[in-house]
Amino acid sequence: MLARTVEPLEYYRRFLKENCRPDGRELGEFRTTTVNIGSISTADGSALVKLGNTTVICGIKAEFAAPPADAPDKGYVVPNVDLPPLCSSRFRSGPPGEEAQVASQFIADVIENSQIIQKEDLCITQGKLVWVLYCDLICLDYDGNILDACTFALLAALKDVQLPEVTINEETALAEVNLKKKSHLDIKTHPVATSFAIFDDTLLIVDPTGEEEHLATGTLTVVMDEEGRLCCLHKPGRFHLRPQDMQVDVHRSVSVRKAHGEGHTIYLKKLSGVLLLPQIPYFCIVLCCLSVVLKLWHVSLSLIKI
């Protein structure tokens, strides 16, 4: 314990050399994930996600708004990530910090690039009235990998949303809401975020804890949908990592999952409204596709240098 306090990086390196981590996980092993749907009774949609100790709650509120002038048939999806002092001592009260702003922009990019819902589906009357979905994501307990948890919480909360039927009264030109007739959103894709912490510019470990993120050279987050399409690639900082090194560790993670016999299908065990996902199998697909992404990323970097 003293070595972990005095020289935490060297302490971790001793474990990483043995292809394991201090918490007992292997390098390509995810923490247990639990999802509770409908956690906030006053919200139009909500979900509570626990990724290890990291806990994020997402509440969605639907309101009326005028459509944008350049897109009269589209509604809005407005995400906001809040990292309050409650979740970790590393965050301070006041205006959103840089990490919260980056997380909010990341979620906005995921929504836009994955086309998780068609904004045209949020249109009530073209040019006059649309739905705006305010998606508030609050971290209740921070222990690393906030982007994966937020992406998962957002998707689960969107699947919980039910919007009432709305008609426009021709005589009064006012909106009339029928709360007895509601319908779920049409979820088009199911984006999944997979984050890695990078040690010594060569070694990748999946689903990093807060301590691992702090000690790592950098982090990398890849978002892909169930069809294997790339939705978002997030690599903050200026650390350098050779693509061939990344591919080796990605394939190592895939090998570990195959060795555990998890297969290539998605399974969700539903129990009393709680979804338990100890090891999400289609992360294998994400990891497999990451090697292709890295090659494209390497080519893009070469073109930029030219």
Image (cartoon, rainbow, N blue to C red):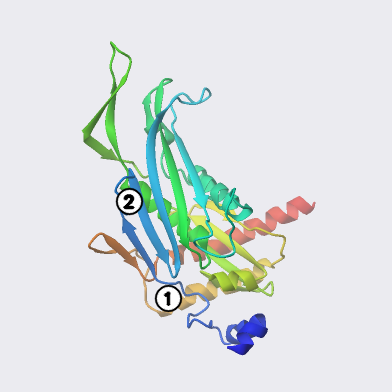
- Is residue 250 visible in the rendered image? The answer is no
| Circle 2: residue type | Ile
Q: Residue at the location (52% across, 58% down)?
A: 147
Mark pair 2, 1: CA separation = 37 Å
Work out which residue is located at the far top of the displayed protein and give it: 171
Q: Is residue 128 above or below residue 224?
A: above
Work out which residue is located at the far front of the displayed protein and give it: 93
Q: Residue at the location (78% across, 53% down)?
A: 305
Which of the two residues, 65 or 271, is positioned nearer the viewer here? 65
Q: Rate crowding at label 2 as few (under 14), some (14 to 19) or many (20 or more) other CA atoms within 10 Å.
A: some
Circle 2 SS class:
loop
- Quarter containing the N terminus: bottom right
Which of the two residues, 241 or 235, is positioned nearer the viewer here? 235
Residue 226: % across, % down: 41, 55
Q: Nearer the viewer, mark 2 or mark 1?
A: 2
Q: Is residue 6 above or below residue 276?
A: below
Q: How many marks?
A: 2
Q: Residue at the location (52% across, 45% down)?
A: 108
Circle 1 SS class:
helix
Q: Is residue 242 above or below residue 184?
A: below
**Label of residue 141 in the image:** none
Residue 82: % across, % down: 51, 52
**Label of residue 258 in the image:** 1
List the residue tagged with mark 2. Answer: 40
Do labels 2 and 1 touch, CB within 8 Å? no
Q: Quadrant of residue 250?
A: bottom right
Residue 231: % across, % down: 52, 50
| Circle 1: residue type | Lys
Residue 247: % across, % down: 60, 69
Q: Quadrant of residue 8?
A: bottom right
Which of the two residues, 165 or 85, is positioned nearer the viewer here? 85
